[in-house]
Image: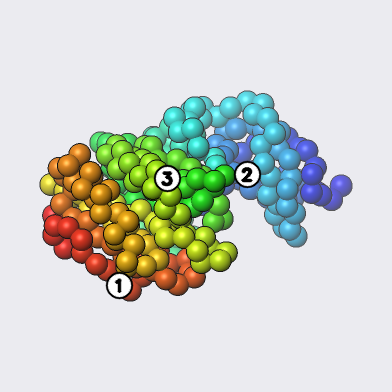
């Protein structure tokens, strides 16, 4: 039988792609399944069929992989930020080590010894930069992260990859924007003001730079009282920046940057 869209089949996951899709084989067809783990036995629904491969989604986990864990993020699988939050860390390292070996040996044709990955001591809250898209949803401004392969924003600020203080600052900005009737940028018609909230943090100094990406420089007047409140509440904010991006583009930052408070850089 030729595989078709909406077919339901049982599949054993035996490998993983660098994009994070599990790989199984049904007859002669390779099937890629997001959010699966090596060792899973699954009931899969086929959603797309090509000549030599297909894509499926999990209908039921018949037998879970020993690598599989319960994700600790409420938006995992919706947000496009994380790939391996459903498997344990040691298994994630082994998968990534395989990617490296494959890149050298199979793709590059280089036969060399690849050492094991050194685990990170801190696997949560370790990033020093975050860019939060801001949109209008259901009559209010929200921010979060893009769903995978889309410009649809999943509202969420408490990402476990970002420092806790990022979520606190972002929530304060969004609350202020809603209380003061400041609209988010609308991609379809170019209306609105606030496009992104962009935050950086010094790894050792803890100094924070806050950047708001807006559509017009004069909008700084609308944020003056917000900036004053943030500076009082968060002593680690050493720099506040306004970046102006008027273009209808996927590029986050515009060409003009205005320094509103503090230093032009953080340490």
Query: Residue 97 at x, y = what percent?
Result: 40, 47
For the residue labelled by badge 3, is the local secondary structure a helix, a strand or a loop? helix
Query: Residue 75 at x, y = what percent?
Result: 50, 37
Which dot, 3 or 1, sits closer to the camera?
3
Q: Nearer the viewer, residue 186 or 51?
A: 186
For the residue labelled by badge 1, is the local secondary structure a helix, a strand or a loop? strand
Which dot, 1 or 2, sits closer to the camera?
1
- The CA distance from mark 1 to mark 2 is 43 Å
Q: Are marks 3 and 1 in contact (CB under 8 Å)?
A: no
Mark number, residue 256: 1
| Image quadrant assignment for residue 100 | bottom left
Which dot, 2 or 3, sits closer to the camera?
3
Name the residue tied to disc 3.
178
Q: Is residue 97 visible?
A: no
Display colour scheme: rainbow
- The residue positioned 80% from the left and 42% from the top of the image is 7
Total number of numbered discs in the rendering: 3
- The CA distance from mark 2 to mark 3 is 39 Å
**Label 3 neighbourhood size at 10 Å, few (<14), some (14-19), many (20+)?**
some
Q: Nearer the viewer, residue 55 or 180?
A: 180
Q: Earlier in the sequence, mark 1 or mark 2?
A: 2
Q: Is residue 112 visible?
A: yes
Q: Nearer the viewer, residue 35 or 263?
A: 263
**Label 1 neighbourhood size at 10 Å, few (<14), some (14-19), many (20+)?**
few
Is the residue 255 above or below the residue 184 in the image? Answer: below
Query: Residue 145 at x, y = what percent?
Result: 46, 48
- The residue positioned 20% from the left and 39% from the top of the image is 233
- The residue positioned 50% from the left and 45% from the top of the image is 140
Q: Quadrant of the C terminus?
A: bottom left
Name the residue tied to disc 2.
33
Q: Earlier in the sequence, mark 3 or mark 1?
A: 3
């Amino acid at each position: 039988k030729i595989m078709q869209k909406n077919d339901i089949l049982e599949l054993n996951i035996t490998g993983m792609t660098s994009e994070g899709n599990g790989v199984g084989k049904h007859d002669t067809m390779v099937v890629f399944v997001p959010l699966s783990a090596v060792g899973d036995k699954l009931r899969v629904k086929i959603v797309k069929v090509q000549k030599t491969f297909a894509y499926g989604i999990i209908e039921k986990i018949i037998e879970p992989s020993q690598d599989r864990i319960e994700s600790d993020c409420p938006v995992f699988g919706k947000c496009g930020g994380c790939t391996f939050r459903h498997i344990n860390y040691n298994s994630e390292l082994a998968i990534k080590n395989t990617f490296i070996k494959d890149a050298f040996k199979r793709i590059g044709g280089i036969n060399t010894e690849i050492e094991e990955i050194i685990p990170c001591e801190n696997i949560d809250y370790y990033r020093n930069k975050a860019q939060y898209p801001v949109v209008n949803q259901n009559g209010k401004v929200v921010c979060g992260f893009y769903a995978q392969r889309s410009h649809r924003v999943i509202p969420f600020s408490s990402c476990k990859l970002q420092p806790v203080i990022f979520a606190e600052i972002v929530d304060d900005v969004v609350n202020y924007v809603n209380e003061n009737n400041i609209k988010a940028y609308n991609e379809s018609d170019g209306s609105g003001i606030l496009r992104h909230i962009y935050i950086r943090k010094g790894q050792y100094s803890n100094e924070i730079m806050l950047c708001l990406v807006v559509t017009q420089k004069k909008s700084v007047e609308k944020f003056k009282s917000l900036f004053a409140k943030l500076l009082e509440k968060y002593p680690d904010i050493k720099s506040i920046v306004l970046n102006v991006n008027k273009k209808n583009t996927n590029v986050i930052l515009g060409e003009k940057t205005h320094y509103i408070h503090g230093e032009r850089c953080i340490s």
